């Protein structure tokens, strides 16, 4: 009798457990279906709201990026943080193959003579031809001034504040730099060239001649001696003209200056190396040039 009772009780418990399990399964199934419907409704709602979709995309992108950075190599991560694909737009450079024959000859010679890269020099040579044509100034003169003033160092600065390729007095000619965004543009090689040509043209016009204009440009308009500056520029320009014409000029050719002719004697060619060093440009000389230009 007792055995029958235990069998009946076991069968009842099994039926109860089976019913409970089946009920829980149904409840879970219905719950998951409801959650799925809620998720679908939320996605549909979010897709209809651009601001919510954008916020969700940003959060997802941030999460993915954080995971990517966590797995990335430190060197690759640093390279990615420092990368700037548009930086090439700031570079002062041009392909030498884009130059005309004359320009290419000049750029190659300057590059080897002053030990500077051909790409930035090619850009400056192109600019000298472009600006020189509009200003009515021989491009070889513009390049010669840069050679003597800074040896093509765009960050050069004199003791009295002349700056850049053409050693323009930035504080004096700040009005000319306003068209280029401010005086910091003095260290942009192309801008310095353009402003320098404006100043050079003004000096030549006021002085009434090329050599006298160069004396004004260096601030020696009212001085007896310009330290050989005008002669050096004209001698270097002569080298550049010969190179542009296809003549062979050694890259180590000395700059020679024509000395003032003595009475009843022929002009003498005196190497710059044999002359006394030119005195540094004085504050007085620069001040006088500023006053005359204004």
Image: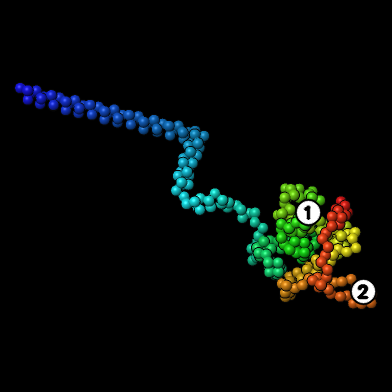
The image quadrant of residue 15 is top left
Q: Residue at x 64, y 66 (%)?
A: 97
- Look at the numbered disc 2 and give the secondary structure of its residue: loop
- Circle 2 packing at 10 Å, graded few (<14), some (14-19), many (20+), is few
Is disc 2 in contact with disc 1, using a CB cutoff of under 8 Å? Answer: no
Could you tell me residue 44's position as x and y percent? 43, 33
Is residue 148 among what the camera can see?
Answer: yes
Towards the viewer: 177 or 259: 259
Q: Quadrant of the N terminus?
A: top left
N-term mark: 2 or 1? 1
Residue found at the very far bottom of the displayed protein? 265
Q: Is residue 263 left or right of residue 233?
A: right
Q: Which residue is mark 2?
A: 262
Residue 238 place in picture, x, y as percent:
79, 70
> What residue did someone put label 1 on?
161
How many numbered marks does the figure carry? 2
* Place of residue 48 in the rendered image (x, y in percent of width and height, measured from the top left): 48, 33
Report the colour scheme.
rainbow
**Residue 13 vertical position relative to residue 233 in the rendered view, above or below:** above
Identify the residue shown where x is 82% and y is 65%. 278
Where is residue 284 drawn, in percent x and y?
87, 55
Taking the image as drawn, is residue 142 in sight?
no
Looking at the picture, tell me which residue is in the foreground, 79 or 194. 79
Res 265 label: none
- Residue drawn at x 86%, y 61% is 215
Instruction: Give the residue at the far right of this rendering.
Output: 263
Q: Regarding mark 1 in the picture, which secondary structure is present there?
A: loop
- Marks 2 and 1 sit apart, C-alpha to C-alpha, by 37 Å
Residue drawn at x 60%, y 52% as measured from the top left? 86
In this view, the residue farthest toward the left is: 1
Disc 1 crowd rating (10 Å Cα; few below 14, some 14-19, many 20+) is: some
């Amino acid at each position: 009798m007792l055995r029958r009772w235990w069998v009946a009780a076991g069968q009842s418990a099994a039926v109860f457990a089976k019913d409970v399990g089946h009920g829980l399964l149904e409840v879970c199934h219905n719950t998951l279906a409801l959650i799925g419907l809620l998720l679908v409704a939320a996605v549909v709602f979010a897709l209809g709201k651009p601001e919510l979709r954008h916020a969700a995309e940003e959060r997802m992108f941030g999460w993915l990026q954080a995971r990517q950075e966590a797995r990335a190599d430190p060197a690759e991560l640093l390279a990615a943080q420092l990368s700037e694909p548009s930086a090439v737009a700031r570079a002062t450079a041009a392909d030498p193959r884009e130059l005309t024959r004359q320009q290419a000859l000049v750029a190659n010679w300057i590059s080897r003579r002053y030990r500077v890269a051909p790409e930035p020099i090619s850009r400056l040579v192109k600019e000298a031809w472009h600006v020189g044509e509009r200003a009515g100034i021989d491009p070889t003169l513009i390049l010669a001034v840069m050679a003597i003033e800074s040896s093509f160092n765009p960050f050069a600065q004199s003791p009295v504040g002349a700056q850049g390729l053409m050693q323009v007095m930035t504080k004096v000619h700040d009005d000319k730099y306003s068209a280029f965004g401010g005086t910091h543009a003095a260290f942009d090689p192309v801008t310095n060239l353009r402003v320098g040509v404006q100043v050079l043209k003004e000096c030549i016009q006021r002085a009434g001649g090329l050599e006298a204009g160069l004396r004004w440009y260096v601030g020696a308009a009212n001085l007896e001696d310009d330290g050989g500056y005008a002669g050096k520029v004209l001698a270097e320009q002569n080298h550049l003209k010969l190179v542009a014409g296809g003549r062979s000029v050694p890259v180590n050719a000395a700059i020679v200056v024509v000395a003032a002719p003595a009475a009843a004697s022929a002009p003498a060619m005196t190497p710059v190396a044999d002359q006394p060093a030119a005195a540094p440009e004085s504050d007085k000389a620069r001040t006088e040039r500023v006053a005359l230009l204004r």
